[in-house]
Image (spheres, grey):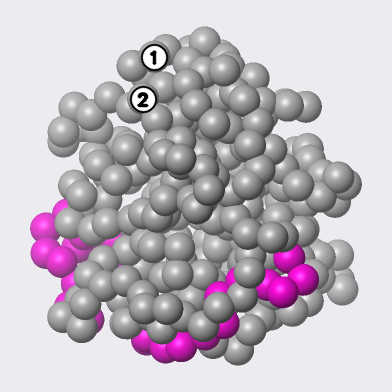
Amino acid sequence: MRQFSMLLSGVMCVAVIAAGHPAGAASGFDLVDVDGGTFIMGDAEGDANEATREVTVPPFPIMRTQVTNDQFARFVADTGHRTHPERIRAGCVWTDRWRSVPGADWRHPHGPEDNLDGRGGHPVVQVSARDAAAFCSWAGLRLPSEAEWEFAARGSDGRRYPWGDAPPEADDGSRHANFGTVPCCAADEVDGYLKTAPVGRFGSGASLFGILDMAGNVWEWTADAFPGRPGAVALRGGGWGNNTYCLRVSYRHANLPDIGLDMVGIRCAADNEKGRGATQ
């Protein structure tokens, strides 16, 4: 089994496959300037929804790492924002399958008995797409498009993973990313972390632009709708419970925007004077 079922809506946990920087809050984040360019998006050997096409992306800045629990806590303290899992008093947690867990939220990612002690530098999870967009807006930023995300992860040289074409397991036994069991899909602490890892911990997994954790750790919301899934939003990057197939830069998933999961987080991008988005 190479695919990893995500969710569709609510708390039912139904499976689905599927260069100027802003001022204000954004000044506290490490943004990488990504040069624009033309690249082949997708993977001819991947899933049907990864059909290849030529895409041109203008220059844009993007966060070097995923948003951390400490950063999200600043946002909540400043705005009083309540996440979707907090409002419905439940979030979805991956065990051997997705389960709706009462009391799971960003402060208690894996359930009410969990907490963030020692994990301020880990990526925030249990945030919906709307929560992610609200955070980015507060920071003077925005969610990246799928094309921006994939270009930031792979550049224009057609690499399969952010670091190149080599698999995530290095020859010396180390790993380029935090991910799960090779037979999909379960948490795996071979890389030192059973679930989330501190952002930026896997430096050898950096993309061509020096961007970290674009494969593994947690999935990331994008700004784009997912074709063929009415109302759904595209996610990218793979997470701590995924196998190597799901860590490819072209791999895609779909979720409705009003759900929180313990394997999905946030990375923000920004506009610059040369504009936003992609032409294809």
- Category of crowding for the residue at label 1, using alpha-carbon neighbours closer than 10 angstroms: few (below 14), some (14–19), many (at least 20): some
Q: Is residue 66 left or right of residue 276?
A: right
Q: Is residue 186 left or right of residue 221?
A: right
Per the image, label 1 sits on a secondary structure element best described as helix
Q: Residue at x 39, y 14 (%)?
A: 88
Give the image quarter of residue 275: bottom left
Please say if 135 is above or below 151.
Answer: above
Asked if the residue under mark 2 is in contact with the one under mark 1, i.e. CB atoms within 8 Å, the reply is yes
Q: Is residue 151 visible?
A: yes
Numbered badge on residue 84: 2
**Residue closer to the observer: 273 or 224:** 224
> What amino acid type is highlighted by mark number 2?
His
Q: Is residue 175 visible?
A: no
Looking at the rendering, the stretch of residues picked out in magenta corresponds to 19-46
Per the image, label 2 sits on a secondary structure element best described as helix
Numbered badge on residue 88: 1
